[in-house]
Image (cartoon, rainbow, N blue to C red):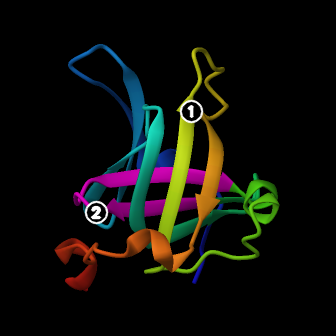
Amino acid sequence: MKKHFETLEKLTTVKKSREGNIYRVLKYDGKQYKEPYFTGQEIGWIKHILWDEKTCTYNCLIITAEERRLWLTISEKIAKEFGLEYLVEHSPLYFCIIQKEWHKPHTLPYWLEELSTYPGYFDGYEKPEALLAE
């Protein structure tokens, strides 16, 4: 179920990693979810979906197989391009992103190259405790 938000600005802050990378963090329900600033693939489960009416985007709060908390923003248009009509909380999600070398502050720091909810990607993985603890 999508939770509707007019703006996520009240929930976000900017942090700096040890390596000097600046990234955004969304704090929701007492937990922090980092915006990915890496190139690579990841699998996880969607804990919450925050729908942004203004930009027509899904803000997916994901718990990865390694129990990291990520905040992945997916536009409705991109989701449909990958054949996903809608996203559902607690469903598995596989994605591959490429970090942009440079981006404007109002744009995402990555491109989505692959996106799938195909359950075959999750063979051999257990749902994280943080997801089951609800």
Is residue 127 left or right of 77 when viewed as pictured? left
Say which quadrant the N terminus sits in.
bottom right
- Residue 41 screen position, x and y as percent: 46, 46
Residue 119 at least partly seen? yes
Instruction: Residue at 22% x, 57% y: name it.
Output: 66
Query: As shown in the figure, which amino acid type bears the numbered disc 2?
Result: Ala
Segment tinted magenta in the rendering: 59-74
- Please tell me which residue lies in front, 9 or 41: 41
Instruction: Kindly identify which residue carries mark 2.
Output: 65
Give neighbour class at mark 2: few <14, some 14-19, many 20+ (Cα, 10 Å). some
- Please tell me which residue lies in front, 54 or 40: 40
Is residue 17 left or right of 25 when viewed as pictured? left
- Residue 78 screen position, x and y as percent: 76, 54
- Please tell me which residue lies in front, 56 or 6: 56
Query: As shown in the figure, which amino acid type bears the numbered disc 1?
Result: Ile
Instruction: Residue at 74% x, 61% y: name it.
Output: 82
Q: Are marks 2 and 1 in contact (CB under 8 Å)?
A: no
Instruction: Kindly identify which numbered label has been placed on residue 98.
Output: 1
Give neighbour class at mark 1: few <14, some 14-19, many 20+ (Cα, 10 Å). some
Say which quadrant the C terminus sits in.
bottom left
- Residue 109 screen position, x and y as percent: 57, 30
- Residue 105 screen position, x and y as percent: 61, 24
Instruction: Residue at 62% x, 58% y: name it.
Output: 115
